[in-house]
Image: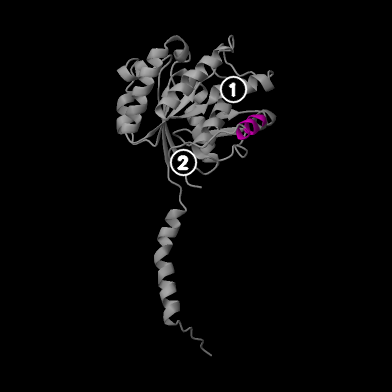
Amino acid sequence: MKHFLFITSPQRWFLFAAMALLPFLGYSQQRDTLDVLFVGNSFTFYWNLPQVVGAMAASQGIPMRIRQSTAGGATWEQHWKGEKGLSTQAMVKEGKWDVVVLQNHSTGAIDQPVQFDDYGKKWIEAVRTSGAEPLLFLTWAYHSNPLQQKAITEGYTRLGAETGTDIAPVGPIWSEVRRLRPDLDMYSDDKHPSPEATYLIGLIFFKKLTGQKAASIPNRLQTKDQNGENLYLSILAEEDAAFFRQLVDESGLPRFKGKTPKN
């Protein structure tokens, strides 16, 4: 016996409407790529921080395109003037970024406060003119002088308040690590981050840029080289990674004011 399915007019209209919406429903579930440019110096490129942030995002299925414009010891003024072989202005103008992370020389807020403010404001305006949103990378004190942190924090906080610019408070969270876990070696030398510290910094930027918790970030992070071979960016003891993740998640870090990936 043959069976026939009869579709009434209201049912037919609903079926056609649902079929028409399928492509759009599928598209809405896809996440937009977040395009991020890191501008800075060795505090940014040590232990491949930009790639670490990208690997953290990839581990959670969040697409990011991350690039950097960095040179050892570079200041915002040197980035602006194209010194040290930098072409940061061109990268900002032509890159179609969502976020540009701005990190000045480690003691710029202390030793050159006028240049810090002047070129910080130049860069913030240039980034916004390009259609992106700036994010200030508040750095940490040297190992030999933790008292530097107060002036560094004040410099970035003042600049952020005067320009309405969001801040990634790496330095203050780093100081908490030094207080809570003095056994952890956060420095490669007197000023540069260790691999453990770079993992912490990566967590801060991951949480800031995505608004998601750091709790599920693995303690081992990897990427691929041009031949498809694994490159390990970070391998931490799980107990140390868990401490960093909990600290970042409990830090009260507000979500970035600019574009973030859709959940």
Please give the residue where the numbered disc 1 appears in the rendered image. Answer: 174
Q: Which mark is residue 260?
A: 2
Instruction: Tell me the element at label 2.
Output: loop
**x then y, percent, for residue 201:** 55, 27
Left/right of residue 99 with respect to residue 153 in the rendered view: left
Name the residue rendered at 47%, 53% in the picture: 29
Question: Disc 2 and disc 1: Cα gap in Å?
Answer: 24 Å
Tell me: residue 253, above or below residue 172: below
Magenta includes 177?
Answer: no
**x then y, percent, for residue 112:** 42, 11
Kind of residue at disc 2: Thr
Tell me: residue 78, above or below residue 262: above
The magenta-colored residue range is 243-250
Tell me: residue 133, above or below residue 187: below
Name the residue rendered at 32%, 28% in the picture: 126
Instruction: Tell me the element at label 1.
Output: helix
Q: Residues within 10 Å of mark 1 (few under 14, many from 20)?
A: many
Residue 45, visible in the rendered structure: no
Magenta stretch: dominant SS? helix
Outermost residue on the bottom side: it is: 1
Name the residue rendered at 54%, 18% in the picture: 140
Q: Which mark is residue 39?
A: none
Name the residue rendered at 39%, 66% in the picture: 20
Asked where in the image residue 196 lies, by quadrant, the reply is top right
Asked where in the image residue 28 lies, by quadrant, the reply is bottom left
Left/right of residue 113 with respect to residue 233 in the rendered view: left
Q: In this orientation, which residue lies closer to the viewer: 80 or 147?
A: 147
Kind of residue at disc 1: Trp
Magenta includes 244?
Answer: yes
Q: In this orientation, which residue lies closer to the viewer: 119 or 216?
A: 119
**x then y, percent, for residue 107:** 47, 12
Q: Earlier in the sequence, mark 2 or mark 1?
A: 1
